[in-house]
Amino acid sequence: MSVEDALATTLGNTAIRLAKDKLPPGVKRIARRATDRGQDIIRGGWFKYPRSIDVSLDGLAASFMTLSASHETNLANLGGEREFLEEFVSAIKPKDIIWDIGASTGTFSVFAALKTGKNGRVIALEPEPELAELFQQNLSLNNIKNITILEIAAWDKEGVLSLHTSGSSGKAPRTTRKGDLTQNPEKFRNSIEVSALPLNDLVKRGFAPAPDIIKIDVEGVENKVLEGMGNLHPRELFIEIHPTLLPHDQTPAMIRDKVISRGYTLTTTPWQRENELLCHFRLNTPT
């Protein structure tokens, strides 16, 4: 699939309903996969899961679809990233353009869209089909119109990548060069091909306006995404660095130094979450 075809992919905007016989087909399919993890999907003829829950953050309220009890618990806790997400949201100004790279099911994007307001925009990149589908359902739940989901991956150059995934009910997917089997893809349920594009090309080719803020969560390929930024210099840059997933010749310090060399300052000591370092960088202002 070409980049243009991938960008043209649209997802249904069906309203979420919890009656068993009225659930959108996409949610039914994802729910069936959740049963593989031992979750009870139907109770008393009605769906216990999937179901929506309300989550509040920094005065903002949003609803999100959950697929299982464990998924609900994790989402209610904002994946253990509440402080980082609060920092992210507090940096957003009205009318800002926010890019969410590795958007998953849209938690960061939804709160960003609410904060930037109807005159701002969120461009979200999520190449994993099940995650993108659930993301679209979350947009419907919140009646959000200022988010655009692009089902492509970010990379240092245009091409086709292998995406190793276990869908919406598994661990976070990972991208590698097409056919690369060095990243333990056997731990995932499936590998699919996805289109990839450097971030700078999104602007050069008219796919997206230049960003004021970028958030990056790409499971170990942070360097590839940074190399594809070209002349992009957003005001704020939020990066989740995954030390255990980085290539053997890279370290978190190398990622940090690459960002600093682009004219940024690390605003605070990175938050630590399991095997992640959550970093907030700010573009230096001329003196």
Image: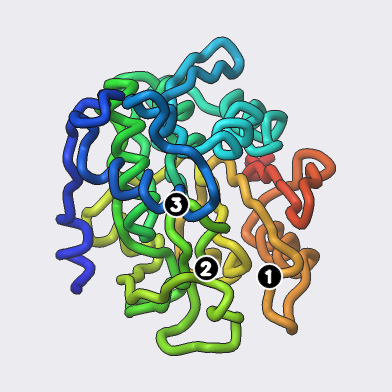
Q: Which of marks 1 and 3 is in front?
A: 3
Give SS at disc 1: helix
Across and down, in percent, residue 49 comes to 43, 32
Q: How many C-alpha atoms fall within 10 Å of the one at disc 2: few (<14), some, or many (≥20)?
A: many
Mark 1 to mark 2 CA distance (whole Å): 9 Å
For disc 3, the marked residue is: 168
Give SS at disc 3: helix
Report whether 248 appears left or right of 200.
right
Q: Which amino acid does label 2 sit on?
A: Arg
Q: How many marks?
A: 3
In the rendered view, tell whether residue 84 sits above or below residue 211: above
Residue furthest to the front: 44
Across and down, in percent, residue 43 comes to 42, 28
Residue furthest to the right: 269
For disc 1, the marked residue is: 245
The dot on residue 174 is 2
Residue at image position (74%, 83%) is 249
- Residue 11 visible? The answer is yes
Q: Which of marks 3 and 2 is in front?
A: 3
